[in-house]
Image (cartoon, grey):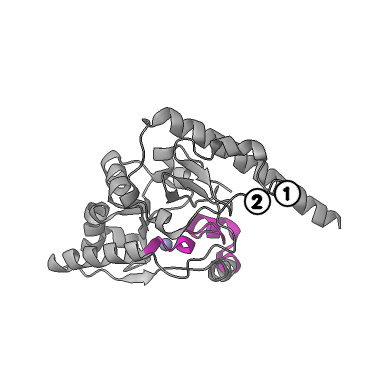
Amino acid sequence: MSRHRTDRRITAGLVVGTVAIALAVAATVAANRPAQSSDASTTPAETTRTQESAPAASSAPAPTEPDPEATPTDHLGGVSFDSEGVLHIDGHVVVNKSFALPETFGPGGLHPDLVGAFDAMAAEASAAGISLRIVSGYRSFAHQADNYTRRVASVGQDAADRGMARPGHSEHQTGLAIDVNDLSTSFGQTPAGQWVAANAHRFGFVIRYPEGKEAVTGFKYEPWHLRYFGVELATELATSGLTFEEHFGLPSSY
Ligand SMILES: [Zn+2]
């Protein structure tokens, strides 16, 4: 029983920490970004999810629900938590080591915008003599849990956490991330890897975990892992050389 109470306290602490981070994120985003509305045409997450009405105030909140004081951040600087507690910034679902998806979050497949963008990218690459293929797409929470458990058993938790997200912390669960061609760091040095690095942003993709940014993103270099953000943000990141975390001032750690 004491174990149970301890778990509850840890969960509550995580929620409080997450809300504190959200407030800091909202303040950072509000301070750093001009007052403007984001371009809805490049925010695929908005098309897949609709904001549900807030729970009735009279219902007793569960102990793990975010503090009501967090609600003033809901529309500040394009930062919001949806009804499942998922953080969105400018319409982009945020998933890293600090921000997780619930087990119930599961679009069941890749987002159609991503699929269309990949097809266009692969066609242009093909014309340049480059073959691109998706080797891993959508993964459910349960699928990621299986993968992670096996990896920990194989290499230990510290090594596993550098290269594989814990369940709920994988972008593959969003349906907005893919692995292409070859899950090897040497892929980055191949003609295909170099073509992807130079061109993916024009189709809305970002190499999410670049070389030398592990301390920022929380994950070691993965030249094969592409997150679909839409052309606008992908081009901004490619131009600035910043990671998603650096661009929005986000933490990423367990
Ligand atoms: Zn991946």
Give me the disc on residue 61.
1
User: Mark 2 or 1, which is nearer the eye?
Assistant: 2
The three-letter amino acid code for the residue at tag 1 is Pro
SS for tag 2? loop
Q: Residue furthest right?
A: 1
Q: Quadrant of residue 47?
A: bottom left
User: What is the x, y in percent for residue 195?
Assistant: 21, 58
Q: Is residue 153 rendered magenta in the image?
A: yes
Q: Is residue 103 above or below residue 248?
A: below
The residues bearing labels 2 and 1 have C-alpha atoms spaced at a distance of 9 Å
Looking at the image, which residue is at 42% across and 50% down? 92
Q: Residues within 10 Å of mark 1 (few under 14, many from 20)?
A: few
Q: Residues within 10 Å of mark 2 (few under 14, many from 20)?
A: few
Q: Is residue 220 rendered magenta in the image?
A: no
- Who is closer to the viewer here, 86 or 75? 75
Q: Is residue 138 above or below residue 89?
A: below
Tell me if 190 is positioned left or right of 63 in this view: left
The three-letter amino acid code for the residue at tag 2 is Pro
User: What is the x, y in percent for residue 166?
Assistant: 56, 59
Q: Which quadrant of the figure contains the N terminus?
A: bottom right
- Who is closer to the viewer here, 213 or 143? 143
User: What is the x, y in percent for residue 152?
Assistant: 59, 65
Looking at the image, which residue is at 28% across and 51% down? 231
User: What is the x, y in percent for residue 194?
Assistant: 23, 57
Write down the residue under mark 2. Answer: 55
| Residues tagged 2 and 1 counted as in contact (Cβ below 8 A) | yes
Q: Quadrant of ligand 1?
A: bottom left
Circle count: 2
- First in sequence, mark 2 or 1: give its number: 2
- Who is closer to the viewer here, 68 or 243? 68
Magenta stretch?
151-178
